[in-house]
Amino acid sequence: MLEHKQLRDLAIRYVWGVDASTLPYWRRTLVVTLRITYAAGRDLFAGQLTLQAMSLVYTTLLSLVPLIAVSFSVLKGFGVHNQVEPFLLGVLEPLGERKLEIASRIIGFVDNVRVGVLGGLGLGLLVYTVISLIQKIEQAFNYAWRVHSPRPFAERFSKYLSVIVIGPLLVFSALGTTASVMSMAFIQRMRDIEAVGLVVDTGTKMLPYVLIIAAFAFVYVFVPNTRVRLRSALVGALVAGVLWQTVGWGFASFVVASTNFTAIYSGFAILVVFMIWLYLAWVILLIGASIAFYHQHPEHLASRRRELQLSARLKERLALVAAYFIARGYLEQGTLLSAEELARKAGVPQESMESILGALLRGGVLTLTRDEPPRYVPARSLESISLKSLLDIVRSAEETGSLSAVDLPAQRPVDEFLDTVDAALAEALGRRTLRDLARSHEPTLRSVDPGQEDTEAPSGAGRAGA
């Protein structure tokens, strides 16, 4: 039997110790799948995703009735408000027989909401409660996507309002259209044919999966404050949709088999069961978001830790790599790069590259364009940016105003040694600037003997272009 350490070493060797891009397709797919599974599981068991899910459970309990009330008001104007309760029963299906009681109580609360009685202040609080739920969901998804800045207020308000007003209408219109199509006489006659009927029945059974996957994909594309590719959103939605149905079936069996809840919690048992299902539902949604993130950003799979710790040497290298590509793009007119593109070229996670770019922005070396996403350009002429100044900016980037190297007690032997090292570095770099670094990829002309073929590229050019 293999020991735990041997199994771990084997996993590291065959999953993390290989370059996936050099593997055959089937093995590359397997390795990437194992890495994504590990990364998503690591994020889940680290505790932050579960804390986000717990927070969303609390916010959902406060906002559920106002959300349905607002949606009910919108749907009532289009005459499809009668579908709210059947839809709610479908969402609460894993609760078994308890779904009827929970759904009826929620609808009862919604019926008691009278917009005319609430007044302006009450209506404002009602809408604010709904918007706070969507804002909390965005924060949770931004965490999964390593997005540190929320949407601007104006954009947030417009997008949230579109979700509240248009979202329910689209969902219930799709459900109504599907039900109408399935009840058409033509479809019913086709079901009488044995072979076709089998296909139609199979499609009917798969329809809940398709609708859930489509809904999850929409959430993954729309909610995070970043550009999410549809393919990555569908991958995360597929996993989350299958988990939703599977966990829902298991939870329904658990609810039916467990009678201790009623004995222990009495009248609160139904609330406890509802909160547990809400928690599981949010965990599943966040797991899908995490999988979609890793599918779109495989560079985050290079490390077995969520937060990549950059050494001082790696920070210096990334600063020079970023400045090199930015300067090349600036000189070549029109090939400006975003943080995501720079991270891909450097082979590191985007948040690690953004920390380096942030230091160069604060140091006055770079500036941002007004594009979406913003792109990086030199803040001044390339000849005025020395390579030594780039390294100095990165080295002092983490020093705050309350503590820096000059604030520490003087230690003459150490200070003299560091001054010697700094002077040696300045002498080695000389007057080399960012323009010199950007131009270093250009091939050097060499004299070639007549009749002799020269197929060897300069070593510096090959290395820089790689």
Image (spheres, rainbow, N blue to C red):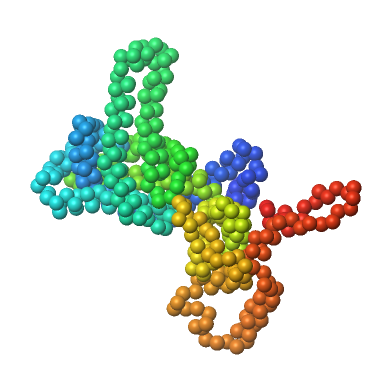
Which residue does the image show at 76% across and 58% down from the upper left?
A: 444
Is residue 374 placed above or below 235 in the rendered structure? below
Label total for image:
0
Q: Where is residue 158 in the image (x, y as percent from the top left)?
A: 30, 48
| x and y percentages locating residue 6 in the rendered image | 61, 52
**Could you tell whether 376 is left or right of 14 in the image?**
left
Q: Where is residue 408 in the image (x, y as percent from the top left)?
A: 51, 83
User: Where 406 sits versus 219, above or below?
Assistant: below
Q: Is residue 310 among the parts visible in the rendering?
A: no
Q: Which residue is drawn at 39% across and 31% down?
A: 210
Relative vertical location of residue 108 with respect to residue 174 in this rendering, above or below: below
Q: Which residue lies most toward the left here?
A: 117
Residue 434 shows in the view: yes
Residue in the foreground of this view, choosing between 18 and 162 = 162
Q: Nearer the viewer, residue 243 or 370?
A: 370
Tell me where residue 317 sits by quadrant. Answer: bottom right
118 displayed left or right of 212: left
In the figure, is residue 97 to the left or right of 360?
A: left
Which residue is nearer to you in this view: 438 or 7? Answer: 438
Q: Residue at x 60, y 84 (%)?
A: 415
Q: Where is residue 387 in the image (x, y as percent from the top left)?
A: 63, 69
Residue 425 in the figure: left or right of residue 351: right
Q: Determine whether 178 is above or below 126 in the image.
A: above
- Identify the residue at horizontal 16%, vertical 43% (top origin): 109
